Amino acid sequence: MEKVYDIIIVGGGPAGLTAAIYALMAKKSVLLLERLLPGGQVSQVLKIKNFPGFESVDGLTLAERMFSQAEGLGLETRYADVLEYSLEGEIKTLITTDGSFNSRCVILSLGAVAKELNVKDEKKFVGRGLSYCATCDGNFFAGKTVAIVGGDNSMVEDALYLAGVAKRVYVIHRHSKLEATPALEALEKSEKVVFLTNSQVTQLIGENSLEKIEVQNKVTKEKSLLEIDGLFVALGKRPDTSLLKSVKLDENGYILTDENMHTNLNGVYAAGDIRRKKLRQIVTACADGAIAATEAIEYLSQY
């Protein structure tokens, strides 16, 4: 008979690694499935200043420490893509590019990736003036000129946050107006904020770091250059849930859970950015992972 793990964790970001640490400390057999490198999006963050215990740490170092701790407890890792999920039964089966694996519990922590601008050289400037998280990186631009691109309520809240730290904030929006909210009313009262509606970013300019952006008005077709120190992209997130056929998702593809990370399937939990939640930060992902593992451990006590 093929080995049946106690828990399979899909995704090696902060949520998945924290879940692994908790489960391994409870002496459970754990397999981590990760397609790239442990750490997820965190590995790409140059500086983190809001994780407890570290005044400042780069994302790669933090990810390596988390993985090293889990590995020291006996974590087994396979680097593979999951091709198919079978999660409804007592024994869950995951078919991957490295074979099939079985477990009694599955913790889904695949994460969510930021929607991109899809303009030339975008990847070049990530961490060099371009960020997908205003609350993560906004403080690095205190007293400087920044721009933010987006259109939903979370973008408005991010812009309001930036207005509290930056010298000037350009708010770039594809449509003629934003939805009226209390946050928007507060943003409109700020003398630091300049609204550019019916507009989109068409070019990123700079040598070693971002120096200017080209913005085009969609109505007049007029183009202008803005000298900025930082650009924040707030176009929303895209969860990695397309293969989850039996797990309940919301209208945007995020996994629906209760406060204890339970999905609609017994023995299946979700943690981190992949689930519907308000705040997506490293510390909240770790909290999700700890809760998910604790619930899985309790579920396993019946066997």
Image (cartoon, grey):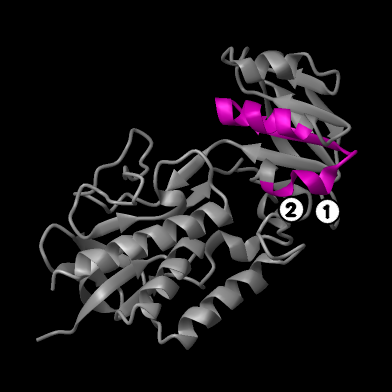
Residue drawn at the location 81% of the way across and 36% of the way down? 146
Residue drawn at the location 86% of the way across and 42% of the way down? 142
| Percent of width and height locating residue 205 | 81, 45
* In the displayed structure image, the side of residue 63 where residue 224 appears, left or right: right
- The answer to whether residue 205 is seen in the rendering is no
Q: What amino acid type should be assigned to the residue bearing mark 2?
A: Phe
Query: Looking at this view, is 55 or 152 the one in front?
Result: 55
Q: Residues within 10 Å of mark 2 (few under 14, many from 20)?
A: many
- Magenta-colored span: 136-162
- The answer to whether residue 25 is seen in the rendering is yes
In which quarter of the view is residue 44 placed?
Answer: bottom right
Which label was assigned to residue 125? 2
The first of marks 1 and 2 along the sequence is 2
**Location of residue 33 with respect to 203 vertically, above or below:** below
Q: Residues within 10 Å of mark 1 (few under 14, many from 20)?
A: some
In which quadrant of the rendered image does the N terminus lie? bottom left
Q: What amino acid type should be assigned to the residue bearing mark 1?
A: Ser
**Location of residue 78 with respect to 231 vertically, above or below:** below
